[in-house]
Image (tube, helix red, strand yellow):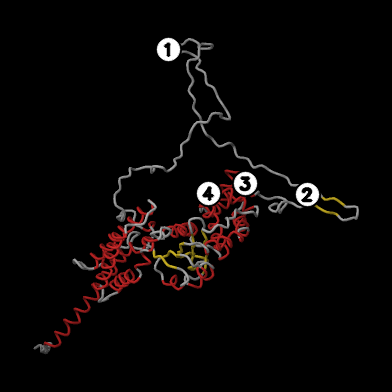
Amino acid sequence: MVVVSAVPKPSYEELAALVVAQGEQIARLTARVAELEARLNQNSRNSSKPPGSDSPFVKPASLRKKGVRRPGRPDGQPGTTLRQVADPQVTLVYEPEVCSCCGQCLAGRPQVGRERRQVFELPEIELSVTEHQLVARRCGCGQVTKALAPAYVQAPVQYGPRVGALAVALWQGQFLAKARVAQIMGEVFGASMAPGTVAALATRAAQNLGEFTDQVRELIAAAPVAGFDETGFRVEGTLAWVHAAQTDRFSLLMVHPRRGTLAMDAMGILPSFTGVAVHDAWAPYDTYTGAEHSLCGAHVLRELVAVTESGTDGPQGTKAMAQQAIDALLTLKKLAQDAHQADRTPAMDRVAVHRQILRSAALIGRQGAAGRQNDLVKKHYALFTRIDRRLGDYLRFVDDPRVPFDNNASEREIRMCKLRIKVSGSMRSQRGAAEFCRIRSYLQTVKKNGVGWLEALTDAMQGIPWMPTTTTA
């Protein structure tokens, strides 16, 4: 006979405690799922992730409204068209031999027309060799004096500055691998070289840019408005950081093992900067109290889009308040752009209305996220709080036409650094990373000033790099 022992039934209090515990666990798991889904749904539209990380199968919707401009080149933007020239270097004339109808010979018959067709072609490329002979002469006193060679002529056999400039531009400007640069230089231009030679040429160019770098640093530090940003950069297999400072005329990049104020101090701009610093809301920038601060509108728009996708529902939920803030911010942007383009002050009554709408959205959104039950809601609370407390920094572009709405110009400065790492995986040394940043600063600055990259790098290879004027940025 089997004896079954009676299992005591749980009491009401035990069941109630179990239900409460399960409810709390479900709430935690639900919040965790929401947080993970929000992280999984991040893209370039709702976070700081670059567009290159977006899925190729799903294109994030844009905040830009459909305009009336037709596809193609915008009106007023210069185009490039291949046109015939009046005096070609070579002219070939083709004569018809017989009539296409009766077959009679056409030699000596009257000419009734001529069609011109021109083909633009590269000539066969061949290196030009220049020999520099340094004459030595003996003085009557017995002293022998030899002539001095140009600064860039340092060896019995070497490549000239234009060859070096092209190799450096292909490697550090166009991000080809060193081995591919060496191959192209040999096969296309007849300048056979090893990958190590390419690196040596880049080192020479970077060494000649010390004075240029110092002058650009001083000019940006004295500018009325400058943008700042930073991005991760792998060096020697570990994470380092590239810091960027830029104006509409000058660019400066610097690599450093740290991301925060230690690196910013080493860059030597923000400690003495007294203009308007445009940046994202990363806290270390705010420690430089000598400058005014303008927060990036594009960053906060991406954060608000993320709230519209993962916030709470309802007329006064965080989703609705985030959308209200987006609409108000974009309206203020358009009001400021239209007014500044027309060289007038924005309509202050309309500005005041949308400023208040934006502030109200921040206040109500903060109340909606005040519980801060999980990390996702904490982010929403922090975002609405920041918008409320730093509304003046977010809207500085409305009152000052010099200040841009966003910090996209600084992001463009560092985007090429990410491309460099995509190609190479990691910079092999701190010295190589520093040389890369110095050369990129030079190339981006000369481009802003309308100087050709080959001309500028050729000058740099000769030790006489292009230098900016003393006019502030």
Cα separation between marks 3 and 1: 54 Å
- Give the label, 2 or 4, closer to the camera: 4
The mark closer to the camera, 2 or 3, is 2
Res. 390 image quadrant: bottom left
Q: In which image quadrant can residue 198 be found?
A: bottom right
Q: Closest to the observer: 328 or 184?
A: 328
Q: Position of residue 91 (x, y in %)?
A: 56, 26
State the quadrant of the N terminus.
bottom left
Q: Secondary structure at mark 2?
A: loop
Q: Amino acid at mark 3?
A: Ala
- Amino acid carrying label 1: it is Cys
Q: Earlier in the sequence, mark 1 or mark 4?
A: 1
Q: Which residue was labeled with disc 3?
A: 191
Q: In this figure, which residue is indicated by the disc labeled 1?
A: 101
Q: Is residue 353 above or below residue 132?
A: below
Position above or below: 377 against 101: below
Q: Is residue 208 above or below residue 259?
A: above
- Viewer-closest of 346 and 375: 346
The residue carrying mark 4 is 450
Give the residue displayed 33% in from the left and 59% down from the top: 45
Q: Earlier in the sequence, mark 2 or mark 3?
A: 2
What label sits on residue 134 in the rendered view?
A: 2
